[in-house]
């Protein structure tokens, strides 16, 4: 055998194997949708490049993989959080005072919750819950445990790419003649029918008008175009090409949307809109002016099914995650003791900087961070990754922040993930074995209204793997790759 995969990653016994597999893997990726627009021309698909990927799947303990997949019922937790006006309002009061962006979102949320028919409005949530495999130093066996990084309730990407990447790695394993006994499966099945497309299809059916359009609300220049298009194409197939899908730039929505009564229309085509699927609108830089804010309010006040509606967006803010890390708050939403235990078991210690915190509390936290800066990460509460602070940058920011500014962040004990080896395949970069860490994202959808859940489903997943030397694993920044789990038993 030219290579093997164990808990430490890929071990090569034939150095020529990488060269033999690379061209085939790159060509397969390019011809099966694993592409992104180039950073030089993000506005056009005339020039695309291969999406960064790992040549081999990465090791994931079977027990922790199964635990993560079974925990995707977390969608129900955030459903209950999103519809609890009192909790959302009190939880986000301090951060809204510190962050004008969240304050505007909260204002729209309250307008929706105070409307006459808010309990009947149907909404869809596509959630990706992200986990890493943490090495507990205090554990005498140094065994790995599952820990949650965050939940993503808006624009959760790569649901369509996950199944494609699994197929790529199945091909690589076959080409390399890797032996894997069926009863101890190596590559878990990743449903080719991704849950995002299924969820959008079910929402479109529930809306009840076959002529109504599904709007993909997108950035002006989205690079991750293949993931979005694969979802779109599968939605069209599921509807037997009856559902009309329209891509609409968020910046153009003020002049393209009109509400008649509570029904949302696309103009000048005068097409009724049944579903709005957001792949943007989670960051202040995506709101060019007040007219875009007005368009978001229009969408949220309409009868169109939102994915997500603004309640789910706010429920995904990291301040909510931090608040739910306290058992007394979790008890409010989860009645079953075993479910609460499982959720808390994957939760890292988190700290907020509320107005209720005393000066002594603040000094205690700051001194601990200064003493052990490698053990913490400072996260903005907003959705959207890549803006965290580590080590010296974290300490400097905390020292320079006033009490109000600090309320826009949460402090989290840092996950210490296991390290393994793999080969990164990226544009114009030498492919070689490197030390890396992986993060498992599990997708699920939930469709319902404030009275009840209609149905939900999970099952699609994606592994993202970053260089161990990097703090952040950004796919578009070139520090991370799409990947698949190679399941092994401890």
Image (cartoon, rainbow, N blue to C red):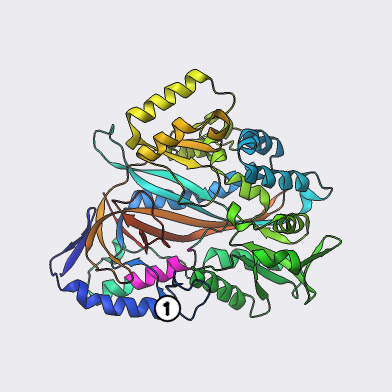
Q: Determine the residue positioned at 21% across, 62% down.
A: 433
Which residue matches tag 1?
32
Locate residue 227 relative to residue 19 in the image: left or right. right
Measured along the vertical axis of the image, is residue 306 above or below residue 245?
above
Q: What element carries label 1?
A: loop
Closest to the observer, 363 or 328: 363
Locate residue 50 relative to residue 126 in the image: left or right. left
**What x and y, as percent, mark residue 197?**
57, 68
**What x and y, as percent, mark residue 381?**
54, 42
Q: Determine the residue positioned at 50% across, 36% down.
A: 410
**What x and y, as percent, mark residue 349?**
44, 33
Closest to the observer, 18 or 206: 18
Q: Does the magenta stretch include residue 164?
A: yes
Q: Does the magenta stretch include residue 326?
A: no
Rendered image quadrant of residue 106: top right
Which region of the structure is painted magenta?
158-169
Measured along the vertical axis of the image, is residue 265 above or below residue 9?
below
């Amino acid at each position: 055998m030219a290579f093997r995969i164990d808990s430490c990653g890929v071990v090569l016994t034939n150095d020529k194997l990488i060269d033999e597999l690379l061209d085939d893997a790159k060509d397969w990726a390019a011809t099966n949708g694993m592409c992104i627009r180039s950073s030089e021309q993000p506005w056009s698909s005339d020039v695309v490049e291969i999406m960064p990927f790992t040549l081999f799947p990465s090791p994931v303990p079977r027990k922790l993989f199964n635990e993560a997949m079974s925990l995707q019922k977390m969608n129900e937790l955030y459903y209950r959080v999103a519809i609890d006006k009192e909790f959302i309002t009190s939880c986000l009061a301090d951060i809204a005072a510190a962050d004008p962006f969240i304050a505007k979102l909260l204002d729209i949320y309250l307008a929706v919750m105070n409307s006459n028919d808010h309990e009947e409005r149907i909404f869809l949530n596509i959630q990706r819950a992200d986990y890493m495999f943490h090495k507990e130093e205090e554990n005498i066996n140094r065994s790995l445990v599952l820990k949650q990084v965050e939940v993503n309730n808006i624009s959760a990407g790569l649901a369509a790419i996950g199944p494609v990447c699994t197929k790529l790695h199945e091909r690589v394993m076959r080409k390399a003649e890797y032996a894997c006994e069926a009863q101890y499966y190596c590559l878990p099945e990743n449903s080719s029918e991704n849950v995002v497309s299924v969820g959008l299809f079910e929402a479109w059916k529930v809306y009840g008008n076959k002529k109504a359009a599904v709007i993909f609300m997108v950035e002006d220049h989205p690079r991750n175009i293949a993931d979005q298009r694969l979802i779109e194409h599968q939605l069209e197939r599921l509807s037997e090409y009856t559902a009309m899908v329209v891509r609409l730039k968020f910046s153009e929505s003020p002049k393209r949307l009109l509400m008649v009564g509570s029904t949302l229309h696309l103009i000048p085509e005068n097409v009724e809109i049944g579903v709005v699927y957001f792949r943007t609108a989670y960051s202040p830089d995506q709101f060019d002016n007040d007219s875009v804010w007005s368009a978001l309010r229009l969408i949220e006040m309409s009868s169109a099914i939102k994915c997500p509606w603004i309640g789910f967006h706010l429920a995904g803010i990291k301040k909510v995650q931090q608040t739910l890390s306290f058992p007394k708050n979790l008890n409010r939403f989860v009645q079953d003791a075993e479910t609460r235990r499982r959720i808390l078991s994957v939760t890292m210690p988190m700290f907020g900087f509320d107005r209720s915190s005393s000066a002594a509390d603040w000094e205690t936290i700051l001194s601990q961070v200064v003493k052990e800066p490698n053990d913490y990460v400072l996260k903005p509460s907003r959705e959207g990754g890549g803006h965290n602070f580590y080590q010296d940058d974290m300490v400097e920011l905390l020292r320079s922040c006033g009490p109000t500014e600090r309320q826009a962040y949460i402090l989290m004990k840092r996950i210490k993930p296991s390290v393994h080896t793999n080969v990164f395949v990226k544009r114009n970069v030498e492919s070689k074995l490197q030390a890396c860490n992986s993060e498992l994202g599990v997708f699920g959808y939930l469709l319902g209204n404030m009275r009840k859940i209609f149905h939900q489903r999970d099952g699609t997943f994606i592994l993202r793997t970053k260089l161990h030397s990097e703090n952040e694993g950004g796919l578009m920044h070139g520090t991370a790759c799409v990947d698949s789990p190679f399941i092994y038993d401890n």
